[in-house]
Amino acid sequence: MSDDKTLELQYANIDLDRTQRTGMQEVVYCGHKSPEQICGIVSAMLERGLHSILLTRLDEDAAHILADHIGAEFTTEAGTAPEAGSVSDAVTTSGAGSNECAAVGTQPGYSLYYDRDGRIAVVDWQKNKSPVGGIVIVSAGTSDMPVVREAAVTAEVLGNRVKVINDVGVAGIHRLIAREDEIRAARVVIVVAGMEGALASVVGGLVGCPVIAVPTSVGYGASFEGISALLSMLNSCAAGVSVVNIDNGFGAAVSASRINQMTAPE
């Protein structure tokens, strides 16, 4: 049964009250959901007047189906994954793919931004014209890019000023030192690293702000699909380093956003 706090579908129970409780509306995790279910959930949220709808772990085929279903303009970044402010540098492409969900007559004018690296999308993105604070996302290597992009898009949607510094892992520590001033200017740092995950400890020893470490499932057999990096980060001797689950760029970004947007009590 639906009310002003929930919207119940046959396969989902949308939490309409989450923004009031937490300051952030419900995000759609698309893994293991069918295109029909994704289309139904997003359509219902749009009909309730929600915007900047974030969808994580969304395959591109399903993204095209969703864009067709809601009559949205499909946009995606051009070229390789860029640095800070990248999400705004999008190019327009036409929706494609078979329409497995029949369109439901939603109002035209929506957009669907899709980040191919991060497999993350934003429907009807109402951008914050004055992003706040400063979140710096530091990655150990290019192979960590999917998690970096998931974190960057999430943090930007939540209204944060975001800077991304890619490929500065400990195998060439001079690359990190060359960006030290930029990293130390952050209010919170997200460190994304696979292999042995040592970058989080190094950054934790350089900065005075909170560090959120994200282990990734990058590495050879002994990395155990990110478990080695996870354990290294959990055992960091640098104070102020907290750790989220393997490949969880979304969770890291939400935590970083809450820290970044905190103000001291009067």
Image: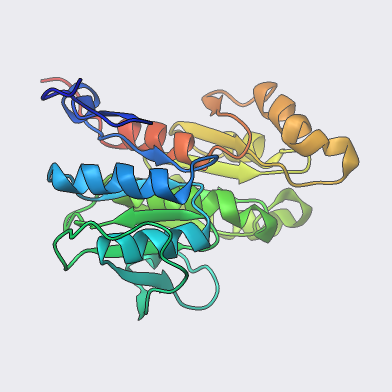
Identify the image quadrant of residue 245.
Answer: top right
Residue at the (66%, 22%) spot, across then down: 234
Q: In the picture shown, does residue 209 fall above or below 17?
A: below
- Across and down, in percent, residue 257 comes to 34, 37
Q: In the picture shown, does residue 30 fall above or below 25?
A: below
Question: From the image, which quarter does the C terminus lie in?
Answer: top left
Answer whether residue 40 is visible to the viewer in this image: yes
Residue at the (29%, 56%) spot, across then down: 123
- 39 with respect to 8 (left or right): right
- 168 with respect to 63 (left or right): right
Answer whether residue 136 is visible to the viewer in this image: no
Q: In the picture shown, does residue 265 fall above or below 46?
A: above
Identify the image quadrant of residue 108.
Answer: bottom left
Between residue 102 and residue 143, name the one nearer to us: 102
Q: Residue furthest right?
A: 221
Residue at the (35%, 70%) spot, across then down: 74
- Across and down, in percent, residue 14 comes to 28, 30
Question: From the image, which quarter does the N terminus lie in?
Answer: top left
